[in-house]
Image: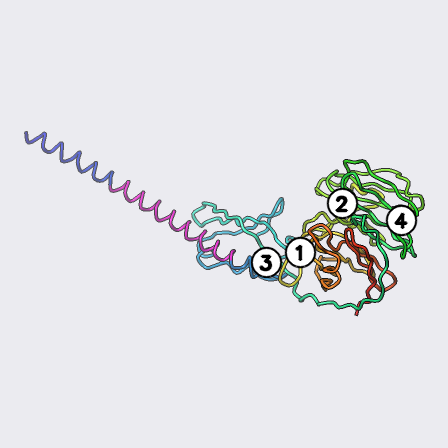
Amino acid sequence: MTVFYKFETTTTKILMKKNILMGLLALTLFTACNKDKEILNTLSEYNTTMESQGYHFGDALKLPASVTENAESISISFGDKSTDKLVVDPNFFTLGDNAVTFNIKKKGGETLTQDATINVFAKTPEQNLTYELVKEYPHDPANFVQGFQLEGNTIYESDGQNGQSKIIKYPLGSTTAMASTTQPADVFSEGSTVVGDKIYQLTWQNKKGFFYDKNSLKLLGEFPYPNVIGEGWGLTYDGKNLILSDGTKNLYFLDPANPSKMVRYISVAGNSQAYDQLNELEYHNGFIYANVWQTASILKIDPKNGEVLGKFDFSEIAKANTKGTDDVLNGIAFKGENMLITGKNWTKIYEVAIK
């Protein structure tokens, strides 16, 4: 009986020690998990605060101490790029929203990850640009304007809608077409621009564009979009490259000799917000002008970096022409230093002097 009693006591002690060790291990793991959760929660709160506040190029990412003190290293990955510099570097980030992942390597060797959005805004507030109405011209209200440009006294216009899409040219002051070419019924035409003796025209969702002889509007050929571009919206020409909008915050620069090749792109933002829904485009005197779809706003954009330098509010003109959701402002051209604006199914073209 005595021997059996001692054996049971020894076994019990072993089991107790094992249970204690397992408990300590579980407590350690629980504490570590709680610590990881605390790090990620703190980082999440910081990211949420900074997402609305935004950064400017050159700003440091001042992560909370609970993150940095427990990290051996921190890096940020963005697409196929990665950096361990916690600075908003223009070589890494773009203006507007940047979807990134924070990678936190802890001192114990484990790695924690968290997705975040880093918004980058322009340092200088955009100016409120003003204008004075100078003159009005007739416009055919049947035309669903997608692309709009003046050369000499001739308007070159791309009109949309499936089954109604076309490219036309007519004298400013008239609504009678001098030439016109229609597209197949499955094509919804978008932006257009003049390049030398050719007209380039986009399609909305057909993933391709057309080019025509400028004089006759005879179709000369077509080209596929670069893979990065999903839709065609607006188009202009800066004397070197085609500039295309796709409804996002991005503007893409294409080689006119090979429009399927993207040269570079910029993202567009002002001092406190990123701008997407960029639509009809016009290049003039070193700046890109873009209307924001479904608004009466036209932006003046620096083509070097996408910074919005100024903003026009054409609400007074637009409200006289906009009765629904489709007939919105969507045409920008220049007549000397004056701007011409019109919209989808508008009855007028307006000439305004920029103050």
* Classed neighbour count for the residue bearing mark 3: other residues with Cα under 10 Å, few (<14), some (14–19), many (≥20): some
Task: Tell me where residue 269 sits by quadrant.
Answer: bottom right
CB contact under 8 Å: marks 1 and 4:
no
The residue where tag 3 is placed is 87
Q: Secondary structure at mark 2?
A: strand
Residue 245, position as x, y percentages in the image: 74, 49
**CA distance for labels 1 and 4:** 31 Å
Q: Is residue 71 magenta?
A: no
Main secondary structure found in the magenta portion: helix
The mark closer to the camera, 1 or 4, is 4
Answer with the quarter of the image where residue 190 lies.
top right
> Is 43 included in the stretch rendered in magenta?
yes
Numbered disc 1: secondary structure: loop
Tell me the residue that label 1 is attached to.
275
Residue type of the residue flagged with mark 3 = Val
Dot in front, 3 or 1: 1
Comes first in the chain, label 1 or label 4 = 4
Identity, as a three-letter code, of the amino acid under mark 1: Tyr
Q: Which amino acid, mark 4?
A: Lys
From the image, tell me which residue sits under label 2. Answer: 262
Q: CA distance from mark 4 to mark 3?
A: 50 Å
Q: Which one is in front in this view, the residue at disc 3 or the one at disc 2? A: 2
Per the rendered image, the range of residues in magenta is 20-48
- Which mark is in front, 2 or 4? 4
Residue that appears at 48% across and 52% down? 72
Looking at the image, which is closer to me, 10 or 31? 31
